[in-house]
Amino acid sequence: MLCMKTRHSSVKRIYEAPLLGARYCGDSSTRVVHDLDNASPECRIDQILAAGRAIPFHSTMVAHLQGYRNCPQCVGR
Ligand SMILES: [Zn+2]
């Protein structure tokens, strides 16, 4: 069992398609954008990926321009 605590959650950037290391992951179904460097388990990034709804973004500004809103858990206001 690992005792080491990481500053961030267990969610890490994903370097495979479709995210390819992008910091932000949009959910094309809910139109919410998550920060993978700060994502919490409630963000369900794994489910977004499994459902094929993950859209990579390199900034929240780009996501907002496409109609996404911030995840309150990991991006904030
Ligand atoms: Zn989130």
Image (cartoon, helix red, strand yellow):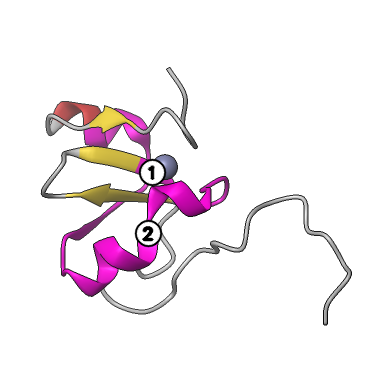
Disc 1 to disc 2, C-alpha distance: 8 Å
Vertical order, 14 against 31 (above or below): below
- Mark 1 sits near ligand 1, with its Cβ under 8 Å away: yes
**One can see residue 42 in this view:** yes
Vertical order, 5 against 3 (above or below): above
Question: Disc 2 on helix, strand or loop?
Answer: helix
Q: Earlier in the sequence, mark 1 or mark 2?
A: 1
Vertical order, 25 against 64 (above or below): below
- Kindly identify the amino acid type of the residue bearing the numbered disc 2: Ile
* Position of residue 27 in the picture relative to residue 41 (left or right): left
Residues at discs 1 and 2 in contact (Cβ within 8 Å)? yes
Q: Quadrant of ligand 1?
A: top left
**Residue drawn at x 26%, y 48% as measured from the top left:** 26
Mark carried by residue 12? none
* Position of residue 65 in the picture relative to residue 9 (left or right): left
Query: Residue 72: which quarter of the image?
Result: top left
**One can see residue 36 in this view:** no
Q: Which residue is mark 2?
A: 45
Give the magenta part as a residue range. Answer: 34-63
Q: Residue furthest right?
A: 3
- Kindly identify the amino acid type of the residue bearing the numbered disc 1: His
Q: Relative to the observer, which residue lies in front, 77 or 66?
A: 77
Q: Which residue is mark 1?
A: 34
Instruction: Residue 31: give x, y in percent of width and height.
Output: 16, 39
Image quadrant holding the C terminus, namely: top left
